Amino acid sequence: MLFSTRARAGNVLERKNLKKVIKSVLDQYPDAERVLIIPPDFTRSHSGAGLLTEMCWRLLGDRVKAVLPALGTHFPMTDSEKLKMFGELPLELVRDHDWQNGLTELGRISGEEMKEISGGKLDYDWPVQVNRLLLDEPWDLILSIGQVVPHEVAGMANYTKNIMVGISGKEAIDKSHFLGAVANMEDVMGRAYTPVRKLFNRGAEKFCSDLPIVYLLTVVAPDLLGQTGLHGLFAGDDDECYRAAAELSQELNINLLDKPVKKAVVYLSPDEFRSTWLGNKSIYRTRMALADGGELIVLAPGIRCFGENEGMDGIIRKFGYKGTPYVLEAVNQYSDMADNLSVAAHLIHGSSEDRFKITYCPGGLTREEVESVGYSWGDLGSYSAKYDYRTLKDGWNTTDDGEEIYFISNPALGLWALKSNFKGDNQ
């Protein structure tokens, strides 16, 4: 089953196009009286999933019994964030996913399967854990909504990842993220089919096939005027839906450059980025475009911590972003790192591997805190005055003093790489 709509080149989809796809899906389930919606959380508010969630609720009415944002390990959404993202959808419908409690384990991918999936690099088993709500209620339809975009762990975000990670638990998140790290991030990002994607798909096929899950997958990119909007919506219950969305995302969200970037400036909106856990998209989404010896400047007014919870934050502060060899050795030597493999993977993702300089300019972390984890610190006021995100355009810019920089207004919307070193699906 595949229902889809795409905007003409340079344009975005109108609401009537989105509603047509949603109605086509719902028409396949005329007797669905108990519907669960699983959208992303506020950190993916640009995905368009909030609008789609509200549209589904308006079409279904009281048949929508719950909305379960796929928080993963992120902060729970505040009421104001829920209202901003989901519009007039009643707050009492929105449940908070707890990644440490309230889970059901559906089964395990064996160590032998993991060894095959990882190319011999890992041999631990992997649990398929989901929020208990999926099984506690007799759902007639589960709508999994989210954005397909290049991703540092899975290659491309969403589809089965929304279930396997977004409403999953610590062990599943830890082990899948570490698989992505050992698979080599630069061999993964922007590819539709990777070891982690294979793991997610296998888990869904083996243990979730009885659940009535339908995916609504968006592709988001700037229009001709530079305004972000939906360029594609793909709905279905199998891989055909994901494949179509991934192909459009690869076309619109991967920016291949002819020359390396000596100085990149990335802006992190305070509405979206409050921790380096999320803000480090500025690093791993640009690393394949940055020149050896170059500099990445991160303007981060909303960054106030490292991890999305106290435990993760403490581990990041203890070990810092010091490169892959250091992290892998720490996993072998220290139990707190071995017991938190998603943090280990994050520390690998957030390092430049000493290849380029990272200057972080946060609004809520001190110089001592920033430098203690291995980054250079920059004064947010001074750097924002020199590199004004309100006047810079995405892409190449020349400053008043003749400096050439590459500016990115939201690293969550894509991937930037040199044409000469990007490994696509056919490589």
Image: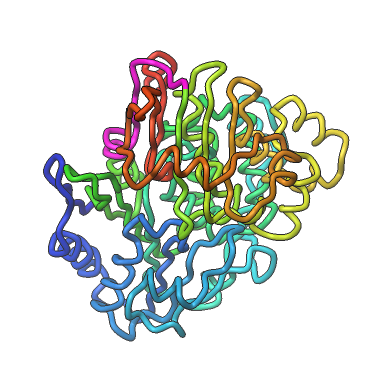
Which residue does the image show at 30% across and 38% down from the upper left? 393
- What color scheme is it? rainbow
Q: Is residue 367 above or below residue 304?
A: above
- The residue located at (36%, 56%) in the rendering is 46
Query: In this orientation, does residue 232 appear?
Result: no
Residue 86 seen by the camera: yes
Q: Is residue 393 above or below residue 105?
A: above
Residue 201 shown in magenta: no
Q: From the viewer's perspective, is 8 left or right of 318? A: left
Q: Which region is colored magenta?
A: 247-262
Q: Residue furthest front?
A: 401
Q: Total marks drawn?
A: 0
Specify the quadrant of the image occupied by residue 266.
Answer: top left
Task: Tell me what residue is drawn at x 52 percent, y 53 percent.
Answer: 301
Horizontal and vertical percent for residue 291? 49, 18
Residue 115 point in image, percent of width and height: 66, 31
Of residues 74 and 118, the one drawn nearer to the viewer in this rendering: 74
Q: Is residue 11 above or below residue 194?
A: below
Between 146 and 238, the one lying in front of the other is 146
Q: Quadrant of the C terminus?
A: top left
Q: Is residue 171 above or below residue 358?
A: below
| Residue displayed at 38% across by 75% down | 35
Q: Which one is nearer the viewer's eye here, 253 or 129?
A: 253
- As drawn, is 126 to the left or to the right of 264? right
List x then y, in percent, for residue 317: 76, 46
| Percent x, y of residue 98 | 62, 68
